[in-house]
Image: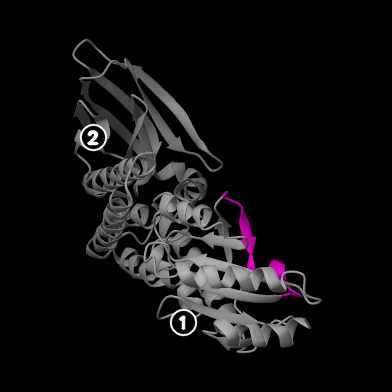
Amino acid sequence: MNTQTFFGTVLAGVLLCGCQSSKVKISGRFVGNDASKVYLEQLAPLSPAIIDSATLAEDGGYEFRLKEVAPTPVLYNLIYDGERIPLLLAGGDRVTVSSVGSVVRNYTVEGSVESDLLRQFYQAFVEGAQQLDLLAARFAEPDLSEAQRKELASEYTAEYYRIRREQLRFIIENKSSLAAVYALYQRLPGDAYLFNGDSDVVYYRTVAEALEKSYPESPYLQTLLAEITRMDARLNLSSRITESKYPDLELMDIYGKKIRLSSLAGKVILLDFWSAELGSSNQLNADLKEIYRKYAEAPVGFEVYQVAIDTSKPLWITAVQEQQLPWISVSDLRGRGSAALGLYNVQKLPTNFLIDKNGSIVARDIYGKELEKKLAELTGL
């Protein structure tokens, strides 16, 4: 569930409690940009909706007045110059939001503890995401040397994990705030999960337990508890998978298409975990290409489902294309945080699993002549 869906669903419940709400005033100044209007957005149940707008005065001043705002904080966005400023507002708040120059980087909040706490997380998170975009753009430049590409890939990975550490630190240190709920649902480009898929439930549960004390009446708490129940159910399902059947994966290929491992049912499958960033699998890939060509037309079909444990999409795509890998290449771009590693208890790279046509894992870490011998037996070639 993404941020807009989560907070929009919660707002549906908030709107039913209008009788307990009161007024909110939002004012401030925006200077240093050409835009002349500022907008107020509310996260409606189905989608965000602009509920008001204001034209800036000559000094950049603006003001909004709201009625029937819930007594516990709910999410709104101020939109100025194409950028959003998230605010957690409660009935009775008198909030001042101002900025000079770059809006998201420089805005300040007074009059709302939750909104200012949210600012502390949001500004750092956006700045980190922008830095990743910058590194990705530099990586895409055509005239870079191999050494420069490796250095940029290393910088990207280091920055990615720095942002993750700061996000998790903020959540744990501010677990009793609604700003922590917002931080739980923020994702960097390519991320499906906060840290490690369904095992993220520990962070959701930590926040929910704290909110039960700080905001017991908040509708966000109930929605968070429902999300925890769903995550627990998925974990229980995974734990019931027997050793003879493989956990399913659904990851994106280099074109952004999701491909399920189970879509290859009935074939012999080599599930291969590798990393373009490590650069240690090139020779193994070259050897595997020869085996792949030999067994691709076997009586029982053979396919490779190769999972890249990387964080740099440009580096991964470049490796797949330069090595002309003919099989299914997928990744969630979460590196060592990939949920796939936990599902298969992968402790080192490269690692592979050979799955027969009946869905049983029949070998692990099998390469070269040993792999060929087993494939001949399983495919009938």
Q: Residue 90: in sight, yes or no? A: no
Q: Is residue 50 above or below residue 314?
A: above
Cβ–Cβ below 8 Å for labels 2 and 1? no
Specify whether residue 260 is in view. Answer: yes
Q: How is the image coloured?
A: one colour
Kindly report the distance in space between the C-alpha atoms of the residues bearing marks 2 and 1: 49 Å
Q: Is residue 239 depicted above or below 154 in this figure?
A: below
Front-lying residue, 282 or 304: 282
Residue under pointer 2:
95
Q: Position of residue 205 (x, y in %)?
A: 39, 70
Q: Which one is in front in this view, the residue at disc 2 or the one at disc 1? A: 1
Identify the residue at image location x=25%, y=19%. 33
Say above or below: 88 vs 67.
below
Residue pictured at 25% horizontal, 30% vertical:
103
Quarter of image, res 106: top left
Classed neighbour count for the residue bearing mark 1: other residues with Cα under 10 Å, few (<14), some (14–19), many (≥20): few
What is the span of residues highlighted in magenta in the rendered image?
Answer: 255-267
Residue 92, label in figure = none
Q: Position of residue 139 (x, y in %)?
A: 35, 45
Q: x, y percentage for residue 188?
A: 39, 51
Pick the quarter of the image with the C terminus. bottom right
In the image, 283: left or right of 210?
right
Q: Which label's residue is closer to the chain start, 2 or 1?
A: 2
Q: Is residue 2 left or right of residue 39?
A: right
Q: Confirm whether the magenta stretch covers residue 176.
A: no
Kindly identify which residue carries mark 1: 345
Label 2, residues with CA under 10 Å away: few <14, some 14-19, many ≥20: many
Q: Position of 65 compared to 357: left or right? A: left
| Residue type, label 1 | Asn
Q: Amino acid at mark 2?
A: Val
